[in-house]
Amino acid sequence: MTRARAEREQALTTVRRGIFQCRKCRLGAGRHHAVPGEGPPGAQVMFVGEAPGAREDASGRPFCGRAGVYLDRMLALAELDRGAVFITGSVKCRPPGNREPRRDELATCREAWLKRQLELVAPGLVVTLGGVGLAQVAGPDHTLAEVRGSLIHADGRPVLPTYHPAAGMRFPRVARAMEQDFETLRRLLAAGLPRDR
Ligand code: URA
């Protein structure tokens, strides 16, 4: 392992520890486990979802329930292994009753943790899962319906927005769109991504 990579891995471990102890917003008070996300530093693709649900809160692992099984199916369409990608959320702690994360919780978590994870993982491409993930990574000016399945840029990074797996599971129209988007992802990866590392 190169020294730069070892340093990056160490820094990501420090971020994980910080997330486990985080009390920067009200979500920290109600969680069982924080869910920092997982994947190798230097992963080519980073996925940003919304927020941990009950199963993720119980286990500390992202997308480990039914939406995770669905996400794995989508990853297979893009010829990606879960172990090769970095998967995290817009916030790292479960909102009570699975409500949407609030604006201040999102801003706090983005500034404290997500931005640092993006810097350290330095993916060639970010895939946002759902409208919350899109706004968290690319700001509030995009509508998911308008940009899904097309490459946009945020902070100089390519971003491919798609729907959240929980929506793909429920709505056939969304499922069809997600299949197209993960096929687009497969093609982008096959063509080679710009890598910033
Ligand atoms: N974000 C999600 O949407 N789900 C998870 O499991 C973790 C983060």
Image (cartoon, helix red, strand yellow):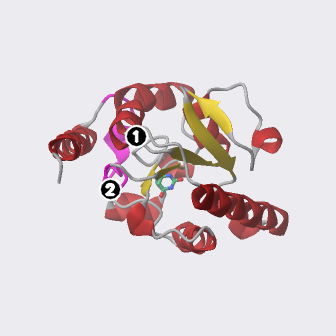
Q: In the image, residue 196 lies at what x, y percent?
A: 43, 38
Q: Residues within 10 Å of mark 2 (few under 14, many from 20)?
A: some
Q: Does the closest atom of ligand 1 sit within 8 Å of the Cβ of label 2?
A: no
Side of 109 relative to 169 (left or right): left
Q: Are marks 2 and 1 in contact (CB under 8 Å)?
A: no
Query: Could you tell me if residue 137 is visible in this image?
Result: yes
Q: Residue furthest front?
A: 191
Q: Which residue is mark 2?
A: 40
Q: Which residues are magenta?
A: 24-41
Quarter that holds the C terminus = top left
Q: Is residue 60 magenta?
A: no
Rendered position, 55 above or below 188 = below
SS of the residue under disc 1: loop
Q: Which residue is mark 1?
A: 122
Quarter that holds the N terminus = bottom left
Amino acid residing under circle 1: Ala
